[in-house]
Image: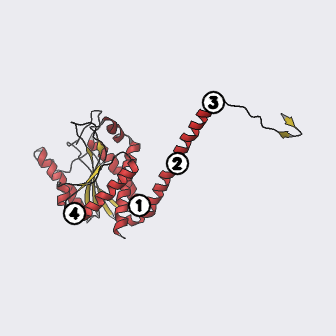
Amino acid sequence: MKKEGFLLPVFTRLPKRSYWLVGAFIAVLGFLVAGLISGSLERRSIEALSRVMVNRVVVVDPGHGGIDPGAKGSGGAVEKEITLAVANKLADFLRQSGARVILTRETDTMLCDPDTSGLLAKKRQDLSRRVNMANENKADAFVSIHVNSYKSDSRQHGAQTFSQPGSEESKELSKSIQAEVIRLLKNTKRKPKEVDYFTGRESQIPSVIVEIGFVSNPEEEKLLQDPGYQTKVAFSVYAGIVKYFAASRE
């Protein structure tokens, strides 16, 4: 209706179902916006702390490789492929913060001599060379990325960090990474554990293993193969590393 040059709004009563749909849409939109804001703020808070990483030397170790595939999932996931993908993403985050990153492997390979006889001997040589990279470069941290498997119970899920008993610095690094994994991934309540393992025992620097999930769990196996989720995992590990070094400066 028009009157003296002014347009008057015409209000139409919506059906009750339409009100419900509009309300649901607004609620979902609000949830998505809140999530984006929260994620953006989280990244900014980590970026504000990331100056502590400048000139830090971090050895990132993608577990397994070459003739050693590691764990396999029923859906085709292979540990050595997942660990390399996540390790590369973690390395990118660390480099962006000014850290010097050493990857123990950048391709699908095993760090052993071709003429080394027997798989066990190859694995031992491979592990020795990985940890030696950290020791010889006097790295500030050694972070080994792995994938878990528990075939007798496919319900097991969630990332978990491990450190060598007796190493207080490794324990603190493990706790820091686990805290960020819990907070950012929101799909695990696992606690950091101390276990005796070769690279931790031989390492002269703070070192941890991060088991980023279970390929024996069908749902988590799919997640671990998803590049977007791999980025989230890498960022949560990165955030834990940053907060560990930030706390060590206090």
- The alpha-carbon separation of the residues under discs 3 and 4 comes to 64 Å
Which residue is located at x 10 percent, y 44 percent? 118
In terms of secondary structure, where does tag 2 sit? helix
- Asked whether residue 13 appears in the rendered view, the answer is yes
Provide the residue designation for mark 3: 16
Frontmost of labels 4 and 2 is 2
Quarter of the image where the C terminus is located: bottom left
Provide the residue designation for mark 4: 167
Kind of residue at badge 3: Lys
Kind of residue at badge 1: Ser
Q: Position of residue 194 (x, y in %)?
A: 22, 56
Q: Position of residue 190 (x, y in %)?
A: 30, 49
- The alpha-carbon separation of the residues under discs 4 and 1 comes to 26 Å
Which residue is located at x 38 percent, y 58 percent? 95
Q: Position of residue 32 (x, y in %)?
A: 52, 44
Kind of residue at badge 4: Ser
The numbered disc on residue 97 is: 1
Frontmost of labels 3 and 1 is 3
